[in-house]
């Protein structure tokens, strides 16, 4: 008998698991409290790499690098199913003011990431001031987040999955060590397996189930510009600020890290600061007004390490949550790791760092 999986959360993390399960013949229902991918999956920049991967814990780098190696084929399969272009683009990234570039180069060589000290592209003149501490990472790619969400959703529907929007999961019905139904404000959904992938809301409890540990929302504000065509064709990064060119000429600028709860308010002071710092790198933005200013809520977790595991209280409840800044980057590898766990298969990655028990042992420090 075909099993019924209920996925709580229709962001990239939830949709990726849904797609993987549909490919294995399961019936899948995805429940979303708002719009599909309408939170951090939509709001982010879509850089397919940790910003400076050598600065992150090894579990983040391992999961991200494994996912990055899968991405081109993964996106191509989704686009073939959906007919929707996710705008995957291997545009490269230039990182400026890298603290110890020789050590970063050595890390890249050890982990199979292409890196060099000089960039062959035509770059804005202000970047000349940082040449001594720059690294060019030619293989870094991006996707356009809203297009990826649309492509994933269409692929899930194409394979027979259901997506219920504005359907708030409120609790679960249990029998012994299993969840039998997911309760929502629109009715109950029977389940043989449940996957919790609720993004920034993963740290909130549903009635009858303990929440995922140490997840909290972290706000990020971003700007969008539309300069003249051709002013930038690679990602620029410096001291936490990134500029991401899109194929249609738009440029994203981001992003902040703000511990503001579930508040997605934007403010003029942040807009002005982001605009000013972006114009220091790309003077073509100086005289332009942003065409959009928005904020999203990331599923924050200590060290950016997600939880990908079985829930400790239930045999048939699984978690894919807490990817913080890199949910889009980690999506294909996270889904593969979780499905291997669900099916009892040996994974290509060591699952230990992503276990529930490991998440309990991690704690928030002073820095976001």
Image (cartoon, helix red, strand yellow):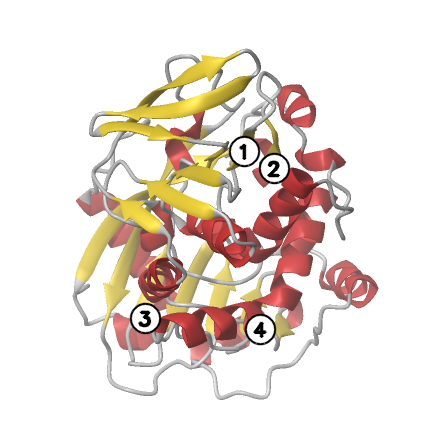
Residue at 75% in and 48% down: 347
Dot in front, 1 or 3: 1
Q: Are marks 2 and 1 in contact (CB under 8 Å)?
A: yes
Residue 50, given in percent of the width and then of the height, sits at: 58, 55
Say which label, 4 or 3, has the lower sequence index.
4
> In this rendering, would 335 be left or right of 263?
right
Mark 4 → mark 3, Cα distance in angstroms: 26 Å
Relative to the observer, which residue lies in front, 314 or 259?
314
Say which label, 2 or 1, has the lower sequence index.
2
Relative to the observer, which residue lies in front, 329 or 21?
21
Mark 2 → mark 1, Cα distance in angstroms: 5 Å
Would you name the residue on which mark 4 appears?
Answer: 73
Say which label, 4 or 2, has the lower sequence index.
4
Would you name the residue on which mark 2 appears?
Answer: 308
> In this rendering, would 137 be left or right of 29?
right
Would you name the residue on which mark 3 appears?
Answer: 251
Residue at 20% in and 30% down: 186
Mark 2 → mark 3, Cα distance in angstroms: 33 Å
Residue 199, given in percent of the width and then of the height, sits at: 41, 37
Relative to the observer, which residue lies in front, 127 or 308?
308
């Amino acid at each position: 008998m075909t099993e019924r999986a209920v996925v709580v959360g229709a962001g990239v993390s939830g949709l990726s698991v849904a797609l993987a399960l549909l490919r294995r013949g399961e019936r899948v229902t995805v429940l979303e409290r708002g719009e599909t991918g309408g939170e951090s999956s939509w709001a982010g920049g879509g850089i397919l790499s940790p910003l400076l991967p050598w600065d992150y814990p090894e579990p983040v780098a391992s999961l991200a690098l494994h996912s990055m190696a899968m991405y081109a084929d993964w996106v191509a399969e989704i686009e073939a199913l959906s007919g929707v272009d996710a705008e995957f683009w291997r545009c490269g990234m230039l990182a400026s003011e890298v603290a110890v570039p020789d050590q970063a180069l050595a890390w890249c060589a050890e982990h199979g990431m292409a890196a060099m000290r000089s960039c062959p592209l035509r770059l804005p003149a202000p970047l000349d001031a940082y040449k001594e501490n720059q690294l060019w990472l030619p293989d870094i790619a991006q996707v356009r987040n809203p297009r990826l969400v649309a492509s994933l959703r269409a692929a899930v529907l194409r394979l027979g999955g259901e997506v219920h929007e504005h359907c708030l999961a409120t609790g679960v019905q249990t029998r012994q060590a299993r969840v039998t139904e997911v309760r929502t404000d629109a009715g109950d959904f029977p389940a043989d397996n449940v996957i919790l992938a609720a993004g920034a809301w993963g740290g909130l409890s549903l009635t009858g189930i303990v929440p995922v540990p140490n997840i909290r929302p972290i706000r990020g504000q971003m700007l969008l510009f539309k300069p003249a065509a051709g002013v930038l064709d690679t990602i620029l990064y410096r001291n936490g600020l990134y500029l991401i060119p899109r194929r249609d000429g738009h440029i994203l600028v981001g992003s902040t890290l703000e511990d503001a709860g579930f508040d997605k308010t934007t403010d003029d002071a942040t807009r002005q600061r982001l605009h000013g710092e972006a114009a220091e790198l790309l003077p073509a933005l100086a005289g332009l007004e942003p065409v959009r200013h928005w904020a999203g809520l990331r599923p924050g977790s200590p060290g950016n390490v997600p939880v990908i595991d079985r829930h400790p209280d239930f045999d048939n409840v699984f978690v894919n949550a807490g990817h913080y800044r890199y949910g889009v980057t980690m999506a294909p590898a996270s889904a593969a790791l979780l499905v291997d766990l669900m099916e009892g298969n040996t994974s290509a990655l060591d699952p230990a760092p992503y276990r529930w028990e490991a998440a309990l042992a991690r704690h928030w420090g002073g820095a976001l």
